[in-house]
Amino acid sequence: MSKKFSFCINIYFYSLFITFFLLPKIVISQRRYQIGACDWMMLKRQTLGAFDLCHQFGCDGLEMDMGPLGKREAFENKLRDEKELQNFRNTSETLGMKVGVVAMSGFYAQNLGTRENYMELLEDCFDTMDKMGDVKIAFLPLGGCGNDWSTNKAKRANIAKRLHIIGERAKERGKIVGIDTPLNANENLKLLKEINSNGISIFYKFQTIIENGWDIVKDLKRLGAKNICGIHATNTDRVWLKDDPDINMPLIKRTLDEIGWSGWLFVERSRDAKMARNTKMNYGANVRYLKEIFNSYPEADVKLNSEGRDPNYVKTILERAQKATDELSITYTLVGQNVLNIIANKYFKLNDIYEERDELKKTDKELAEAKCDSKLYRSHFEFGTDLSKYLKQEEIDKIKDIMTYNVVKVTYDAQCEMIPSLTEEEKKQIMAWLIEARELAIDAESSDKKHEIFGKYKGRINNYLSSRGYDLTKEREEWYKRIKENGGNV
């Protein structure tokens, strides 16, 4: 056997080893935990917008609802329509957002124990799961069964019987139905034994355990990995997951590692009560936290130029930059990460330019100012160009306003309130000058310098209005009078 042939054989078997032994372990490790969000809780129940939101948050996928039920005979399920189905499939594939679970949230209000057509509803769910990429897990809450079903023998027996039928049908179709119960691990194990079907499992919910004062870690260990098909990894609406004292997520993750569980964790609630309607901030923050604990949050395309800088300075700059992304509610999205870094890098660059100028001033003041102006000019247009890759023009303007303390809006509004008789032409001129001032102020080296620039333009505006015949002293006195009459302070 030649050395060349022997070398090729060795390479071949080595590649087989990598393919069949090492790569699967890597893939399994990467996919052990997958993070998503519930579309109905984001007010995007069975809509294409839910896929886009989850994509913005950096999710692996989503939990898609079957649609409202209420007094209807069937779910209001859009995916029975072939055209709608194709739209959902295309969006899912294009954004790389798969459906991890199909939910029947309608059963939070509907009684499984008394609903006559319950199997028709389940079959509709199973069909939808097949249509959306062979989804394996369905979510079925038992909230609509009443408060006493678990203690009332007759009701419990009826529900267990129906769940057995559901579970056996789920097995036939290659599915698992995860039930949401108000029970702890011991009681759930008893219920599963009564149901007696491998097609039924527990869809675990942190909120239930916390509200009952039970220990999540102990409960997970008692219930066991094989009895958990999915997790709603959130609490009631109050604070974000990272700030919740009732959830030790790193410890929960270690526990799930120890018991050998793998699967989907979904953000259902845990919204900040102070901004409960801000979907992007609430779900983005919680998804990121779960990704950081269980998986890995995607890195931003734009790198933060923080190397070699004082960590405290970097922290301050990031906090300043985040005020802008918070205002746009994009901080906890993939776009927000890139925008945050662009803004922070802008501050870093300004600092570098002015430090270089100050150093060069010691030997050549004229050259120092010339170099500074040249670099500021280039960096100014780079900033807008970089932001335009991720934001619309009105969003870019908003960021610039925040970086210049909203002086444009404050000044413009004050001028319009002080002189109600301003013409449209005059208003446009005032706004044009304020925007021009903002473009200069954004590159200024300090807050004082920024305000100094605006001060010069305010003077220009006052001269312009005076030339148009306005008595600014009188207009201001009348304005102050109106403010006081309305109970305000001057």
Image (spheres, rainbow, N blue to C red):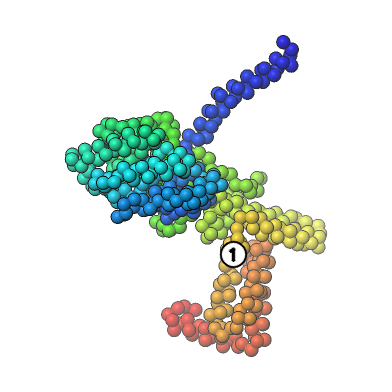
Q: Residue farthest to the top?
A: 1
Please identify the residue farthest to the front as the structure is shown. Answer: 82
Q: Is residue 36 visible?
A: no
In the displayed structure image, the side of residue 178 where residue 449 appears, left or right: right
Relative to 129, say whether 237 is above or below.
below
Binning the other alpha carbons within 10 Å of mark 1 as few (below 14), some (14 to 19) or many (20 upward) gives few
The amino acid pointed to by label 1 is Glu
Q: Does dot 1 land on a helix, a strand or a loop?
A: helix
Residue occupying image coordinates x 63% and y 69%: 451
Label 1: which residue? 394
Q: In the shown orientation, is residue 182 left or right of residue 364?
A: left
Vertically, is 176 above or below 267?
above
User: In x, y percent, where is residue 223?
Assistant: 33, 33
- Picture quadrant of residue 469: bottom right
In this picture, is 33 found above or below 477? Answer: above
* Residue 483 point in image, percent of width and height: 47, 81
Q: How many marks?
A: 1
49 or 309: which is nearer to us? 49
Q: Residue at x 65, y 87 (%)?
A: 468
Q: Residue 316: horizontal and vertical position, in percent?
A: 57, 53
What's the residue at 44%, 32% (across, down)? 257
Q: Residue at x 60, y 85 (%)?
A: 472
Where does residue 280 sit, x and y in percent of width and height?
48, 54
Can residue 224 be seen at all in this image of the molecule?
Answer: yes
Where residue 394 sits, quadrant-wise, is bottom right
Q: Nearer the viewer, residue 316 or 276?
A: 276
**Residue 226 location, quadrant:** top left
Quadrant where the N terminus lies? Answer: top right
